[in-house]
Image (cartoon, helix red, strand yellow):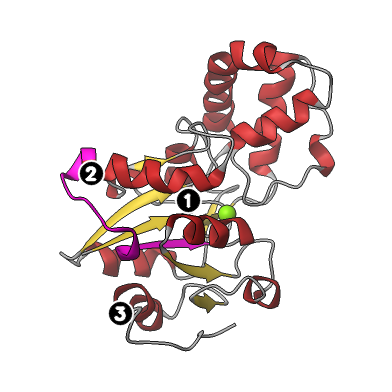
Amino acid sequence: MRLILFDIDGTLVSSSRTGRKALGQALREVFGTDGELDTYEFAGKTDRRIVHDLLTAEGLSVSEIEARLPELDERMAAVGRELFTPDTVRPCPGVDLLLEALRRRPDVVLALLTGNIRHTAPLKLAAAGIDPTQFRAGAFGSDSLDRNELFDIAIERVRLSTGLHFPTDNVIIVGDTPADIRCARSGGGRVVAVATGPYPAEALNRHEPDFLFSDLSDTDSVLQAMLNPWAVSAVEGG
Ligand SMILES: [Mg+2]
């Protein structure tokens, strides 16, 4: 059995700057500022980390931020329902066919490991035409500031939801940033990197993913990497 943990932004979907816009609107409504949002580097960070960095830089204390997080999450969901549409959020190349092929496999469990908060992850997926319920569990950006901590959280949530416990070397992360690669390494899993986010293949390759694809459209090769990662040694594509 394999557990495949999908990142969302840049991996399953591309939403340009819509996620940033949604966060900015919610931050301004709840905290009166979105700080240096326009220039902040999002990729690979959890939403909690982003909010924490932006607001502490504006002089807010951690306790002031924490106290209003539930309200912020609610606003982000409300704004997300407005802004995440099929026009603004699109599936990345090959994602539909790959997920369809994976759903047919009895030896695969699909779950999420994403920087998006629990409230917005399903909205973004649904806007791109990806059924969020095919993912049996998830670790989200609302669970920790530190993406690496999401690895163990995801495995535990999958155990609670399916009764299956996955040894870490049967876990594969699919992601588009060096932070996804570090997360897999820190947890002891494998990683399939894909260059459909902000990082070109050469940049991802420097972080030595187990596999690297320019996008997920070569379904057979991606399946081979995910399901028989011990039988294939070369980094593909790129
Ligand atoms: Mg990503």
Judge from the rendering whether residue 160 lies leftward or rightward of residue 51; answer left or right: left
Magenta stretch: give its range. Answer: 160-175
Q: Is residue 172 magenta?
A: yes
Residue at left offset 34%, top offset 59%: 168
Q: Position of residue 92 (x, y in %)?
A: 52, 63
Ligand 1 lies in quarter: bottom right
Q: In terms of sequence position, does the residue under pointer 1 or pointer 2 come before the other?
A: 1
Q: Relative to residue 46, is residue 173 depicted above or below?
A: below
Q: In which quadrant is the N terminus drawn?
A: bottom left
Helix, strand or loop under label 2: helix
Identified by mark 2, the residue type is Arg
Residue matched to label 1: 128
Q: Quadrant of residue 39?
A: top right
Q: Which residue is mark 2?
A: 159
Nearer to us in this view, 208 or 220: 208
21 sits left or right of 227 in the view: right
Q: How many marks?
A: 3
Residue bearing the label numbered 3: 228
Label located before the other in sequence (1 or 3): 1
